[in-house]
Image: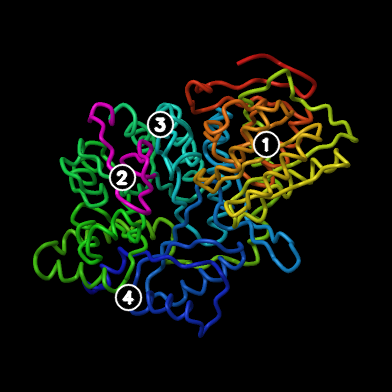
Amino acid sequence: MTLRQKIGQMIMPLVLGAFSPEGTEAHEREIAWIEEDAVGGVVISVGTPVDVAVKLNDLQMHSEYPLLVGADLEAGAGFRFRGALHSPTNIVLGGATAFPPPMAFGAVGDPAYAYEMGRITATEALAMGVHMPFAPVLDVNNNADNPIINIRSFGEDAEMVGEMGASFVRGLQEHGAIATGKHFPGHGETEIDSHLALPVIRVERERMDSVELAPFRSAIRAGMGGIMTGHIAVPALSGERVPATLSSAVLTNLLRGELGFSGVIFTDAMNMGAIDRLFPRGEAAVRAVVAGADVLLMPPDVTEAIDAIERAVQRGRISERRIDTSVTRLLRLKEDFRLHENRLVPVERVPHIVGIPEHSDVAREVSERSLTLIRNERGLLPLLGTRSARVMSVTFRPKNDMLASRYFDGRLGATYRRLTSTHLDEDTHEAVYEALLRQARRSNLVVVSVYSNFAGVIEMTEEFVDFVNQLSARRITHVVVSFGNPYVIHDFPDVQAYLLAWSGTAASQRAAANALFGGQAITGTSPIGMSPLFERGDGLRISAKGVLGGR
């Protein structure tokens, strides 16, 4: 390889799994990265399983050297390759297996399920041509205001996060994929989203050792093959206010030296604000390589990044030997996948492997067992399910979540003949809330559902929060179900019943609705706390026929 080809091996741009025929702008841009810039791999995101497999086969055929393919699959292959909705017909097109997020696994508390998620994720990813699921998330979510980790973490206890993460790693790697733990050295203790700005974690080294670094140590001992850096500054580790991604003290001295990690180091996306707003783009790429990164994910400008690193080698800032070290590591990984023998996947096999009932049954079981009941005043749950009752279902959701309440309301409607359903978002007018409150006074029950995004983020409006608090103040019988962020109770602390369902997947919606009527047991315990409202380990247990016990 020429020097430029070797540098190209260290770059992985983002491609979408959407259908992009030859001659389209998207297709031509992707082919240029491969044929002209000689990138070593791609990060693929969103698309149906068959479209993803077809696209990756096409890209592989254009590349002189086999491409290494990664994808964010933190909650199974369905995290990126599921959920397409055909808007003209309102038909869900399906896709890969979608698990609830890692925090739901923490609520179950059984590492065997984390292993199963790893096994199924590896099986489905490889069938589509994805070699490296960028998972597990090994961050310890010890800050309730964290805007980017939240339910992506297994919980707030470092030992449990390490145990779950190591099980997930084994499940992935014993079935052919390579795990990539993130976001090193730990992104849990922050109130800033690194997509937007640089978080600075101001804790002592001793605390980092006992909390943030502990899960990474466990996963490394389990044989984890990859680690993704966090765009976070930890002065206790680096001695300066610089992102860990660009710190040799963090990546080389700590990760390679002290922790003994010998796998592939990936940067987090280089187009994120914590990097891209603070450093010139070419300079950021050079600094990441100097720090010890093997692969730069999603640089804002692929050619510019390669040019900058090439100039740095020519000027002696980076040795060519340093480049060779990373490229050799990557080529060996491709050889381990036997991509030099066969880089393509049989597309006709995808429907026989991806999203099959055997896999979705495991996701359903986790969704059911993770349900966690934090509050149940006067034994409100399980509901009586009186068919003639006047019941309101009120859903607050992100504007782009078209599947929120689809399955949940379907189950409620099957029991309550007089159910009314209302969907709210950040643009809902105040007058709507006034009308809802008048209706609630005439109702026997109000079921409030709150849906958040993949990271637990939901921007609840003052009007919505006031509506829920008015239900409490007026003692209108109500239940709040959080399909995502467990911390939303902070805004309405006097709710009568509060159920954590952890995600808005179809399985989680159905499980929550069934549990409301006592159709199944509620047995989860919270892997996080929010004092004084609830503590880690809390969870009221209810059987399918009645109360099992207390916290």
Q: SS class of the residue under badge 4?
A: loop
| Image quarter in which the C terminus is found | top right
Mark 1 vs mark 2, foreground winner is: 2
The mark nearer the N terminus, 2 or 4, is: 4
Mark 1 vs mark 3, foreground winner is: 3
Which of 516 and 331 lies nearest the eye of the viewer? 516
Label 4 packing within 10 angstroms: few (<14), some (14-19), many (20+): some
The mark nearer the N terminus, 4 or 3, is: 4
The mark nearer the N terminus, 1 or 2, is: 2
Residue range (magenta): 182-208
Q: How is the image coloured?
A: rainbow
Q: On the image, which quarter does residue 310 sit in?
A: bottom left
Q: On the image, which quarter does residue 384 sit in?
A: top right
Which of 301 and 296 lies nearest the eye of the viewer? 301
Give x and y (percent) for residue 418: 87, 42
Which of 189 and 328 lies nearest the eye of the viewer? 189
Q: Among all residues in the image, which is located at the extreme right?
A: 388
Q: Label 4 vs label 3: CA separation?
A: 41 Å
Left or right: residue 115 compared with residue 285: right
The kind of residue tagged 3 is Asn
Q: Label 1 vs label 2: CA separation?
A: 36 Å
The kind of residue tagged 4 is Asp
The mark nearer the N terminus, 1 or 3, is: 3
Disc 3: which residue: 142
Q: SS class of the residue under badge 1?
A: helix
Q: Are marks 1 and 2 in contact (CB under 8 Å)?
A: no
Disc 1: which residue: 365
Where 222 sits versus 231, above or below? above
Disc 4: which residue: 37
